[in-house]
Amino acid sequence: MLELRDMQLLLSLARHKHFARAAAVCGISQPAFSMRIRNLEDQLGLSIVKRGNRFQGFTEEGEIVLRWARRITDDARAMEQEILSAKGTITGTLTLGVVPTALAYASRLPAMVAKVHPGIMMRLRSASSLQIQQGIEDGSIDAGITYSDGVSADVLDLLPLYEETYVLVAPRSMAPRARGTATWAEAAALPLTLLVRDMQNRRILDRHFAEMNLHPQVLSENNAFTSSLVMVNEGFAATIVPQALIASLGEIQNAVALPLVEPELTKSICLVAAVRHQGLATVQALQRILGREA
């Protein structure tokens, strides 16, 4: 008889790709962890893991087992939540992956959810759009707030949230003007600090600049807007951030925020969850709350 615990261990190994780290996260010793994986292989009569001096991945049969392990653990978790929901209570941890540009928007969600469902504990995790899709696939993330571009509707359930627009934030001494708007050409002429290239936001900006035949002066790259805004405050460079972030921060000391126009660029931000996660009561609760807002 297959045990749910073995499925969870297998998923931990897939997530961490390292026996010792996976075992530590699961709260058991590495020898005990390895023994349970071997016992599962013996029980199924096949090799699940490619072995060497270190973890080398899963065999072809192992990938099949892994796919079923995700389905089994998802169904078990959904069953637990549905039973609690039937009793009138929705409880559990909801892990939400969020692209950096939407963190300001997402930061208000735990309080919103807690008002309706105090038993739900939300865990916000900053991640790239690719990391969110991978996390939803491997089960480490329940849902995500990301760009709608590239979302596969047959795999992910999508709920539009808002349109992202962009603002030039520049030191007062560097800004093209003190108020009003700025053009993308004016932004490209300034020394800029932007997100790193593996972030969707950066790819959007690079593509937009290229389409306008503009060549921005990028002096530094960061994986968070916080670092960029510190550099702006110190007068080192300007940056481009989502309007939602500026709205949450209010006035930035020593800086000017000018909406970018000619043309105005908009991108759709949405809530995504795996179609297979539709049975999770915590995800359904979040979808209902945001659906009423959208």
Image (spheres, rainbow, N blue to C red):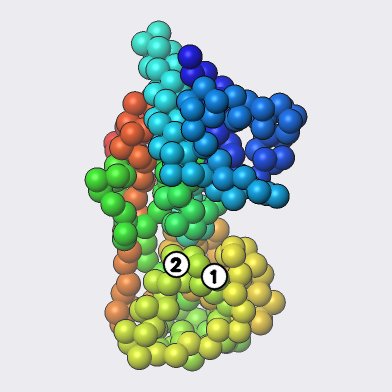
- In the picture, the quarter occupied by the C terminus is top left
On the image, the x and y values in percent for residue 150 come to 31, 59
The crowd level at tag 2 (other Cα within 10 Å; few <14, some 14-19, many 20+) is: many
On the image, the x and y values in percent for residue 283 come to 39, 32
On the image, the x and y values in percent for residue 74 come to 42, 28
- In the picture, residue 28 is in which quadrant? top right
**Which amino acid type is shown beneath numbered disc 1?**
Leu
Q: Nearer the N terminus, badge 1 or badge 2?
A: 1
Q: Is residue 214 above or below residue 225?
A: below
Residue that appears at 40% across and 53% down = 146
CA separation in Å, label 1 and label 2 = 7 Å
- In the picture, residue 236 is in which quadrant? bottom right
Q: Is residue 72 visible in this depiction of the protein?
A: yes
Q: Nearer the viewer, residue 254 or 271?
A: 271
The residue labelled by disc 2 is 201
**Which amino acid type is shown beneath numbered disc 2?**
Asn
Label 1 SS: strand
Q: Nearer the viewer, residue 270 or 134?
A: 134
Q: Which mark is residue 240?
A: none
Determine whether label 1 and label 2 are within 8 Å by CB. Answer: yes
Label 2 SS: helix
| Horizontal side of residue 288 vs 137, given as left or right | left
On the image, the x and y values in percent for residue 35 come to 67, 27
The residue labelled by disc 1 is 195
Residue that appears at 36% across and 33% down = 277
Q: Is residue 158 above or below residue 268?
A: above
